[in-house]
Structures are given as structure tokens and as C-alpha cells.
Image (cartoon, rainbow, N blue to C red):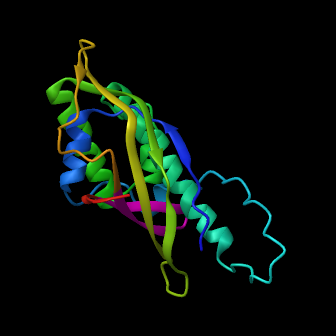
Amino acid sequence: MTTVRRMRTAALCGALPLALLVAGCGGSGGDAKPSEAAPAASQPAPAPASSSATPKDPDAAQKRAVLAAYASMWAEQMKAYKVADATGTDLKRYAALTALSKLRLDLAQMKKSGTRGTGTLGHEPTVTELKTDGKLPTATLQDCIDLSQWKAVRTSGEPVPLPSNQPRRYLATAKAEQWPGGWMITDYTPNGARTC
């Protein structure tokens, strides 16, 4: 069984965008190109394997690189959600195509509704599929998003409660591609109907 690592990111996003993500909104496209991608930040080494006869995962380094790119995307996204603006973030270094378009839509909705985020957003991502034998290596991730410590506020400071039907923990999937500069998250799809 794959060890699930709990990654906590200082999360700062608005209720409207997160509700839209759970509903699966978004667009297509985006202006990031493979040549613009920067190398992903390195991920800490995994804990030593137990003394059992379990074979070593030959894809462990690639999976760590995918998880590092995903964590970096979320870190930059949270910086943007804190102020409802991606200016000054490195979001385009880690998110592209449909994922970047959806994040930009979220930020536009936040700005329009006058919301921003505060609190902590929890993650439990794992790489569920890795294909490195093709011309363009790809990966699929599954994440358990935890909203229990996350809060949204209006720019005036007034709290914005989550919708009553919004699960506090739900599954999301992400797609990644290995571009010349490193792994990029190319799509993100929440599934509010699947709790975790």
C-alpha cells in the first residue's frame, strides 16, 4: 500500500472559487507553454523502507517529482487566493492548460465577489498512475482535500460560511505532464460527491 503523506499548505482561498471547483467548473486553454516551465521544487526523501522483502518502487523518484510540482502549485495558488490575484506568484511554473484556466477563473470570481481566503487547506495526495514510456510522460494524482481548517472572508473581513452541503473532506484528481522544464499540473477536477 502506498504511504499517504499529509501535506499541509497555508491555504487562503475564497468560498466561491472552492465551491466552483467542487462543482467542476472551469474552462480550457491557458497560456503557459512547455518552454516556460521551470523545474519543480524537490520533495523530501521518503522514510526508509521497512526490513521486509518489499521490492523498491522503480518510479519513486518520478512520483516524488510529480508530488513536488503539485505541492508547489497549491502553495502558489494559496498565495493568490489570499489576495484574489495571481500577480507576484509563480503559479505558471507549476500549473498549465486547463488547470491554470480553472485557477484564473476562480481568482476572477473571487475578485468579483470580494472574497479571499484564510486558514489551512489539508492535502493527502498520491500518484495513482505514472506513464513514462511515451514521448510525453504523464501522471494522475488523487488528493483528499480537507476544508476543516479553511476559512473564507469578504475583503471587509466578514466571514463567509461554506454551503451546508459542502463536504469538509472530498476527493479530487489532477493530471500532470512532464515538460522540458519539469512536471506541470495540467488539469484539476474536484469530486464533491466522493468524500474521503
User: What is the quadrant of the N terminus in the image?
Assistant: bottom right
Please name whichever residue, 193 or 62, is drawn nearer the observer in this view of the structure.
193
Please name whichever residue, 80 or 67, is drawn nearer the observer in this view of the structure.
67
Q: Is residue 69 magenta?
A: no
User: What is the quadrant of the C terminus in the image?
Assistant: bottom left
Is residue 165 placed above or below 135 in the rendered structure?
Answer: above
Tally of numbered tags: 0
Is residue 112 placed above or below 6 in the rendered structure?
Answer: above
Task: Kindly identify the residue that appears in the image at 40 percent across and 45 percent down.
Answer: 146
Please name whichever residue, 13 or 2, is drawn nearer the observer in this view of the structure.
2
Q: Does the magenta stretch include residue 180?
A: yes
Is residue 143 placed above or below 120 in the rendered structure?
Answer: below
| Horizontal side of residue 19 vs 65, given as left or right | left
Q: Can residue 184 be seen in this view?
A: yes
Q: Is residue 90 visible?
A: no
Outermost residue on the bottom side: it is 133
Q: Where is residue 8 in the image (x, y as percent from the top left)?
A: 53, 42
| Horizontal side of residue 10 vs 22, given as left or right | right
Please name whichever residue, 4 or 43, is drawn nearer the observer in this view of the structure.
4
Task: Kindly identify the residue that appears in the image at 78 percent across and 69 percent down.
Answer: 49
| Horizontal side of residue 167 vs 34, given as left or right | left
The magenta region covers 171-190
Picture quadrant of residue 18: top left
Outermost residue on the right side: it is 51
